[in-house]
Image (cartoon, grey):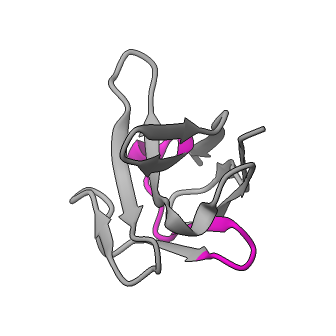
Amino acid sequence: QVQLVESGGGLVQPGGSLRLSCAASGFTFSVYYMRWYRQVPGKERELVASIGTAGGFTNYADSVKGRFTISRDNAKNTVYLQMNSLKPEDTAVYYCNAHLVGNSYWGQGTQVTVSS
């Protein structure tokens, strides 16, 4: 059974940091591209960050460049999103996605709220 389980969300003040984790099981994690998306009510899901299978390739949305870092540990079947210098506009539900041609898996999401 395929599972992606996000954790690490919560309430943080502007300028603070959070580290999201996504633990994968039920598929060969190391061959999948991993992505983090986010979504706010009434808006489309937005791609935030991507990472290649070995971690050498990363890509970020312009809105988070220089503040967020995506990484993965294939030995632990886990992908991370380190979020620094958080802003109120980063408030959203963050979703983990595993992608390979013909297959795409999603987690249930974790809420991140940036507010004073």
- Give the left or right position of residue 75, taking residue 87 as reference: right
Instruction: Give the x, y percent position of residue 4.
Output: 69, 46
Q: Residue furthest top?
A: 42
Q: Identify which residue is drawn at 61% across, 62% down.
A: 29
Residue at 44% x, 44% y: name it. 37
Q: Is residue 75 left or right of residue 35?
A: right
Question: Would you say residue 18 is visible in this rendering?
Answer: no
Q: Which range of residues does the magenta coloring cover?
A: 73-96
Q: Quadrant of the N terminus?
A: top right
Across and down, in percent, residue 12 comes to: 64, 55
Residue 112's image quarter?
top right
Q: Nearer the viewer, residue 2 or 90?
A: 2
**Residue 75 x/y as whole percent:** 72, 79
Side (left or right) of 41 relative to 24: left
Could you say which is closer to the camera, residue 106 or residue 113? Answer: 106
Up/down of 29 relative to 76, above or below: above
Whole-percent x and y of residue 51?
A: 41, 68
**Nearest the camera: 100 or 48?**
100
Residue sitting at x 29%, y 67%: 59
- Magenta stretch containing residue 84, yes or no? yes
What residue lies at 44% left-to-right and 54% top-to-bottom? 35
Residue 6 colored in magenta in the image:
no
